[in-house]
Amino acid sequence: MSGVAEWFRWLNSAHGINLSIFYDGFDQRRFVTGLETTLGLSLACVLASFALGVLGAWLQGSRSPLVRGGVRCYVEFFRNTPPLVQLLFFYFAVGTLLPTLPDGTAGGRPLISNVGWAIISLSLFAGAHNVEIFRSGIEAVPRAMREAAEALGHSRLQIFRLIVFPLAFRISLPAFNNNLVNLVKTTTLAYAIAVPELLYASAQIWSESFNVKEMMNILLLVYLALIALVVWGMAWLERRLRIPGYSV
Amino acid sequence: MRARSGRSAASEIMTLLDPRWLRALCLLSVCLLPVSLALAQAKAAPGSESILAGVLRWLPLVFSGFLFNLLVSVLSMALGTALGVGLGLGLIARGTPTRVMSLGAMQFFRNAPWLVLLFYAMFLIPYQITLFGRTVPFPDWIKAVIGLALPVMANISEIVRGGVLSIPAGQWESARGLAFTRRQILWLVIIPQAVRRMIPPWMNLYATLTMATPLISIVGVQDGLTMTRSALVAEGRPELFLPMYLALLIMFFAFCYPVALTTRALERRFEAQT
């Protein structure tokens, strides 16, 4: 390991290419923490937005026009406003309305941390897209399938859970994958509320070690690798879940 | 081989605009804003100036900033489209090196986060360029336009490729039978037909770009979001946060929602025709 560090130190002194994350322990820890935060943030948002998407798609099939209208409003509002402004709206505007927890200091600890708000806001944004994606998947499930299930005496929830949604999920998987990739890219917005994710960590490193160019390139490569991982993983899932005769 | 012309595109789009977005907008401003104002008023210290007066004082400034967001979105879209058409034609070129290089560029700029590309452009484009003894300054906002145009370019190239490939092979073959050259086939036969199919995804991308423009405030360009934040700092009243951010969100919604509705209507129309 020290050989690698030595080589990068030499690279810096001989060629002026300063990749401090490979030889400076402090920068390295910051970068790794940033990577972990980005991964954790992405994972939490993927799970939460998936749950929101399923819930929204289920509620959109509701008999009450009020519930359907509510879901519609949620989807349209979050799909047609900038995610960054949504994030700041939640963090600064909604966050200040909530009570604070006493922790001994004057201001107290906020009820929801910046990481918490980032997860909530990004999940709501991606969730709105997921509702729309799953809805079109559900529409693509043949009517006869639902009718057959009804004839067999399944309840509405059973039909959704056991028959319609599994098929709809498979049909909407390509669009869902696209949204996942977008979600991973959108986690960079958390930079704006000082969540120490990859971009934030890199910005700290380049402003202290004066290696903007090197860190920029590393940052781009790391994100491309992350996205490639997601794309490969989801392509594998698509192949695994292929339904013969469904052309998906 | 040519697509039917019919009415002008503008009038076609106008007829597609339904009053739904107006209803949605009214609903938003009638329900959400007063609620937020009331919530803010409840939080305000007694005896201080009313929340509504505070919001109204800053609204013109925020709106002018929002108009700047729209200007940036239009410029980025124009630049991104011009570059993207070139890259898209590179994606369907017959020469393997051109195709592979275009594919690499497309994948790179499409998969990198927008904010990271924006940082990239802001830091790595020089603040001025000397060409033939003339110094051309590069202000921050132009660099931001370029930074946003990069991902737009990559997405446009994919739209162009998809559009061209969606035209049946018979069109190519019959045009070749009439002794058109490849360039003539592309520009006179294929692209005029493909443009119609490219319009909905192109508009979708424009809406996405418009919603990405507040990112430029992170890298220090003064846009609607910057104006909102400085107004809030100037006022120093946390209870103003809710109505002010909501007002900015509604401005974007009022612009992006009709674009989304028109896109959907166009998609349905093209689906019904083909």
Image: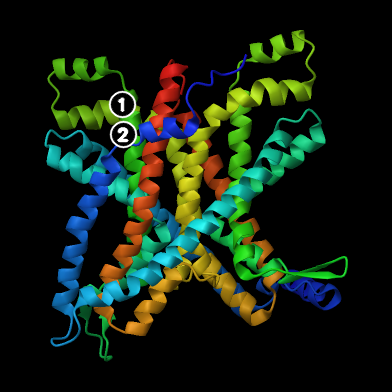
Q: Are marks 1 and 2 on the same chain?
A: yes
Q: Is residue A67 above or below residue A25?
A: above
Residue sitting at x 25%, y 14%:
A144
- Relative image position of residue B189 (x, y in whole percent): 67, 20
Asked whether residue A118 appears in the rendered view, the answer is no
Q: Amino acid at mark 2?
A: Arg
The residue labelled by disc 2 is A135
Residue B251 horizontal side relative to residue A7, left or right? left
Disc 1 sits on a residue from what chain? A
Q: Quadrant of residue B83?
A: top right
The residue labelled by disc 1 is A139
Q: Amino acid at mark 1?
A: Glu
Residue A52 horizontal side relative to residue A178, left or right? left
Callout 1 touching callout 2 (CB < 8 Å): yes
Label 1 to label 2: alpha-carbon separation? 6 Å
- Relative image position of residue A11 (x, y in whole percent): 81, 72
Q: Is residue B116 above or below residue B6?
A: below
Query: From this viewpoint, which residue is outermost toward the right?
Result: B132
Q: Quadrant of residue A232?
A: top right
How many C-alpha atoms fall within 10 Å of the one at disc 1: few (<14), some, or many (≥20)?
Answer: few
Residue sitting at x 77%, y 74%:
A6
Disc 2 sits on a residue from what chain? A
Q: Nearer the viewer, residue B258 or A221?
A: B258
Q: Is residue B123 above or below residue B171?
A: below
Q: Nearer the viewer, residue A189 or A157?
A: A189
Q: Nearer the viewer, residue A170 or B270?
A: B270
- Relative image position of residue A188 (x, y in whole percent): 50, 61
- Relative image position of residue A106 (x, y in whole percent): 26, 91
Q: Is residue B204 above or below residue B179?
A: below
